[in-house]
Image (cartoon, rainbow, N blue to C red):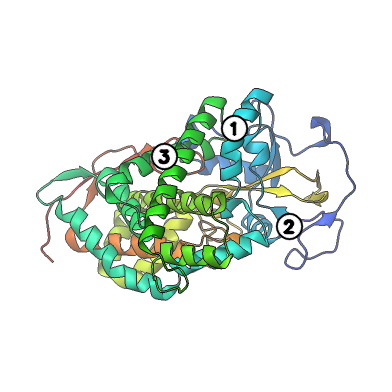
């Protein structure tokens, strides 16, 4: 397997990812890995099915320069490279400045409130701030807390399914995949049920902004309005909670809100922007990824009836099946990092500050890592996918997402063993980053009473 570092070095990628290099101006003539101006990666065909484009990129080489992403970025296609970048501290998660604050001086000035809040989210921080915040937030995702929450999720799913009794066909996205993650994260965060529709709309505006390879000013403004409204709603919610829980001297509250307020009182997390940014991140990330995993996963299973039937016959495969669905059709297709020092990767010079786009969806279909990677196999046991990230930034809510998905699929298999697709072609949402379905119409032949 080719090392990610310059082939002239003798450094093993598992021990040392990159080799230093002196700063050198980069021009198109100096980047043989650059895509041609006509080589758009994100087009209508890519939004329908990105995997042929990933195969083409991989065949042409492991690294490519593209002007399509945020004014210019290096694309990595191999599983080994993506995994290595995500675990190496020399690739920084602090990447929002050059992304949000591109444009005219007036546009940058207008977006300052957005950047101040957006950049405080744990998702965009490095150690030590990332480490500190992750320890605080983990209180809501520890195994004992999730086990106690499982029964609540089962009741939510049962209620959503019961509402569909007697319906021969329905939109799975609208009926189950969209509302359930919102209900779960709302309960976790202590949100009022009547505000959930607003939070969903704000979350979707953020998803549209984050998912755009090069968002325009209008998309940024809409995301800013939604993020600031979301933060104001959380601020009001926290004020009510503080008034109810006047004594914050003991961590007696077992929900996430209580733990965060106690951490604020202890000085382990700052109030104001830092606290509000984490709430917004948890709501947004918890909803978008789980919704798309539910939809992508069910579509993949029903598109491969043999796999759906095999899962019915061997339900013990469900945990493994969910992980295979994550690999096969990842709800997050890529992530970004900033290079913190000049370096060489696969013979290409990268400068400090360059953006790297780690193509998770491509890594998950890398034939050097997975046999027959374009084949769905719910019994596959070939190691880890990259869909929850890797290294210090691995998704903090991964266990919750897996639990939600397993509960939903287990109940679907029990209630609707003959579930099938209505539409011959899927309705993809058009978001290249958060790949998912806008509509997933399914038909049930029979209703099994549990």
Residue for point 42% across, 57% down: 325
Residue 265 at x, y percent in the picture: 53, 65
Q: Which residue is mark 1?
A: 111
Q: Secondary structure at mark 2?
A: loop
Is residue 71 visible to the viewer in this orientation of the structure?
A: yes
Q: In this rendering, which labeled residue sits more in front, label 3 or label 2?
A: 3
* Image quadrant where residue 311 sits: bottom left
Mark 2 neighbour density, 10 Å: few (under 14) some (14–19) many (20 or more): few
Residue 132 vs 72, above or below: the answer is below
Task: Tell me how far mark 1 sits from mark 2, CA to CA.
Answer: 42 Å
Residue 212 vs 450, above or below: the answer is above
Residue for point 50% across, 49% down: 332
Residue for point 12% across, 61% down: 448
Task: Tell me how far mark 1 sits from mark 3, CA to CA.
Answer: 17 Å
Q: Is residue 338 left or right of residue 47?
A: right
Residue for point 49% across, 67% down: 262
Task: Tell me how far mark 3 sits from mark 2, CA to CA.
Answer: 43 Å
Q: Quadrant of the C terminus?
A: bottom left
Can you tell which mark lies on residue 202? 3
Q: Quadrant of the N terminus?
A: bottom right
Mark 1 and mark 3 residues within 8 Å of each other at the beta carbon: no
* Image quadrant where residue 13 sits: bottom right
Q: In this rendering, which labeled residue sits more in front, label 1 or label 3?
A: 1
Q: In this rendering, which labeled residue sits more in front, label 1 or label 2?
A: 1
Residue placed most toward the observer, 65 or 374: 65
Residue 445 at x, y percent in the picture: 13, 51
Which numbered disc flags the more N-terminal residue, 3 or 2?
2
Mark 1 neighbour density, 10 Å: few (under 14) some (14–19) many (20 or more): many
Q: Which residue is mark 2?
A: 2
Is residue 61 visible to the viewer in this orientation of the structure?
A: no
Q: Is residue 167 left or right of residue 133?
A: left
């Amino acid at each position: 397997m080719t090392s990610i570092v310059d082939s002239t070095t003798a450094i093993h990628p598992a021990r040392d990812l990159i080799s230093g290099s002196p700063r050198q101006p980069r021009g198109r003539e100096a980047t043989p890995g650059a895509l041609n101006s006509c080589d758009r990666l994100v087009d209508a065909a890519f939004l329908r099915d990105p995997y042929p484009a990933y195969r083409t990129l991989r065949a042409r080489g492991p690294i490519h320069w593209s002007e399509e992403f945020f004014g210019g970025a290096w694309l990595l296609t191999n599983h080994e490279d993506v995994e290595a970048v995500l675990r190496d501290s020399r690739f920084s998660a602090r990447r929002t400045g050059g992304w949000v604050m591109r444009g005219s001086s007036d546009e940058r000035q207008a977006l300052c409130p957005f950047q101040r809040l957006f950049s405080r989210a744990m998702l965009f921080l490095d150690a030590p701030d990332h480490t500190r915040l992750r320890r605080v937030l983990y209180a809501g995702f520890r195994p004992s807390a999730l086990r106690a929450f499982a029964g609540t999720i089962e009741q939510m799913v049962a209620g959503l399914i019961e509402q569909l009794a007697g319906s021969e066909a329905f939109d799975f996205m609208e009926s189950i995949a969209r509302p359930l993650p919102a209900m779960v994260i709302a309960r976790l965060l202590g949100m009022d049920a009547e505000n959930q529709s607003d939070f969903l709309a704000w979350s979707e505006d953020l998803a549209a902004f984050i998912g755009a390879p090069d968002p325009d000013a209008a998309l940024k403004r809409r995301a800013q309005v939604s993020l600031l409204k979301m933060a104001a709603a959380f601020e009001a919610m926290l004020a009510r909670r503080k008034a109810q829980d006047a004594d914050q001297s003991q961590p007696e509250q077992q929900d996430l809100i209580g733990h965060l307020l106690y951490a604020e009182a202890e000085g382990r997390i700052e109030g104001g922007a830092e606290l509000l940014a984490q709430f917004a991140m948890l709501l947004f990330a918890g909803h978008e990824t789980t919704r798309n995993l539910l939809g992508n996963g069910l579509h993949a299973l029903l598109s491969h009836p043999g796999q759906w039937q095999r899962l019915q016959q061997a339900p013990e495969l469900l945990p493994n099946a969910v992980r295979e669905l994550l690999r096969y059709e990842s709800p997050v297709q890529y992530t970004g990092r900033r290079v913190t020092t000049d370096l060489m990767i696969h013979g290409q010079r990268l400068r400090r500050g360059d953006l790297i786009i780690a193509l998770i969806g491509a890594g998950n279909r890398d034939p050097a890592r997975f046999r027959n990677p374009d084949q769905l196999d719910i019994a596959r046991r070939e190691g880890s996918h990259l869909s929850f990230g890797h290294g210090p930034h691995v998704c903090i809510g991964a266990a919750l997402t897996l639990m939600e998905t397993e509960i939903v699929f287990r109940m679907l298999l029990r209630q609707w063993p003959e579930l099938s697709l209505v539409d011959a072609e899927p309705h993809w949402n058009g978001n290249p980053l958060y790949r998912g379905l806008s509509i997933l119409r399914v038909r049930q032949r029979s209703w099994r009473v549990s």
